[in-house]
Amino acid sequence: MKQISAFAYLYNYYAVPEEYTSPEDFLADAASRPTLLVTRLVENGCIAPYFIEEETELTHIRLAEPDRVHLVDAFLLSREEYQARLGELICAKCGGCLHYTPPADGEPVDTAGHEKEMTLDGLCLLRAEGREPYTLIDAADDFWCDMLDAEDSIRKPLFDGELTEAADALGVIFARHFPSARETVFAVNRSLGQRYLMFGALSPEARLVNRYVISRAPVEVTEYWMLFDHLPRGISRYEPQTGYDLTQTPPTVEFKRLPGKLPRYVLDVFCPPAVGGIRTAHETFRYLCAELGEDLLFTRAAELRIEQTADYASHRPLGEFWQALRADCGFFARRRISRDFARPMELVLPAIETGSRSAAERVSTMAPGLSLELAGREFGGRMTRIVDEWDLPVCTLALTLPGDADRRERLTTRVCREIIGDLQRDALLLLVDIARTGIKLYIDFLATAAGETTEALRDLTPEFADMNPRLTVRTRTETRVMKLNYTLDLIKRVPVRQEVGV
């Protein structure tokens, strides 16, 4: 094995030409040259920073973005040596993994597949013992597969006008795969030859998951169904699913506008008492979505409380709430509300310091933010519920932004729009929150496939090289804080029961 000087540029690796006395001399010269002839280190049957010598190739490149050039120490091995070292690691580390089949007596170790999973440092992020971990990406794909297999059980009642039966069939399929199923409400409808399939969310976290599931829908679904990540007004038709029929006794409201540029309200909804343990909140939510739209409830109701009371009729008609929104948003109120719902909301946080951290500059979020909560190690109920009930790891990538204000802004843009954007497009993370506090950048996300997500972040080590990256992963059993480098060096591991004061 031979150690060489190399550099990473736009997710590829190249050897520093041997004629340069130091990597720094090479960078100084490269900045003034339009193109360079260099040796590319190809990740074919290997994982950086270890490369197979037979897989290298000469290529011309142009370093158009010099601040994306990151020096690294790389290692060259022959194919035979790489396979031999990998085989030794497999024998030493893979026993007990569900993915591993020991070779028969006298047979050589089969390295097929392992060269894409285990590094020559012995790091494997896909190990499974006892059971395969729950992954959101697999659950979403399996849901759509089952939905296509059972499509007749949805399509027939839909065309017969039995919308509740069709929605219930979807709910049964969804519940097979998602611990969050009880927080998702389905609705179906059809109009002018178009079929609509709607995912309603009883919490902001369920809304995040529903959006992700829709993003994984295959073309076999999208060519026949229009998919919504909410229950829209007009398309989402209310039909009582229990004996609690709100069309006969519509709920009433009281509302109060909160200060701020965006019109947001505290909304109290009053409905008649029910008997027999009927889920009035569930029914009332569906009714509100049909009359107002779930997009309106999420973007304009900062607080939503539903109360059963015998004197519900003494409060204001529901239509007055819509009229108040029309007064705030003008003639195009519905269009503005839908636009706000479709994009992440930008909220200004109060200037409150968390320990020694400076006040947050802003937070972009699709759900109640977790960044500052995680940064301060203050694990609250919302995050705990995602982890414990849904079995989804909640992660924070913490970066220290170097340089002056302009460079920090450029780095923030690059990380958030390009690097994190690529991971989102690859469906490897579900972004929850981005927050800036002075020179610190915090990115909160749910790991849709824990091993693959961490593996993808590890591969981005050079991109974060000068940002002191720290990755915090919170699971059911522990919190791990790691350096984001090729070996994911552990900084701290804390069992859940000892979390206070991490």
Image (spheres, helix red, strand yellow):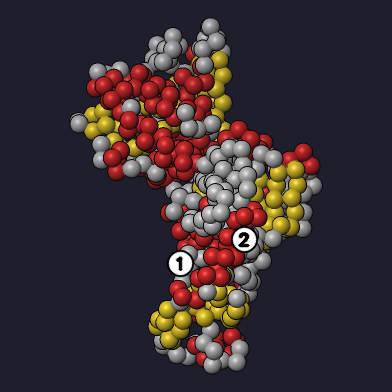
Asked whether disc 2 touches disc 1, contact meaning CB atoms under 8 Å apart, the reply is no
Q: Position of residue 4 (x, y in %)?
A: 59, 80
For the question of whether residue 344 can be seen, the reply is yes
Which residue is outermost to the top? 276
Q: Residue at x 56, y 19 (%)?
A: 307
Mark 2 residue type: Glu
Q: Look at the picture and state if 385 lies above or below 170.
A: below
> Residues under labels 2 and 1: Cα distance?
20 Å
- Circle 1: residue type: Asn
Q: Position of residue 488 (x, y in %)?
A: 65, 60
Whether residue 422 sits left or right of residue 331 in the image: it is right
Tag 2 secondary structure: helix
Element at badge 1?
loop
The residue positioned 55% from the left and 74% from the top of the image is 77
* Residue located beneath label 1 in the image: 44
Determine the residue positioned at 77% across, 38% down.
497
Quadrant in the rendering for residue 383: top right
> Which marked residue is nearer to the observer: mark 2 or mark 1?
2
- Judge left or right: residue 355 versus residue 476: right
Residue 254 — which label? none
Q: Which residue carries the number 2 mark?
A: 88
Nearer-N-terminus badge (2/1): 1
Q: Nearer the viewer, residue 423 or 363?
A: 423
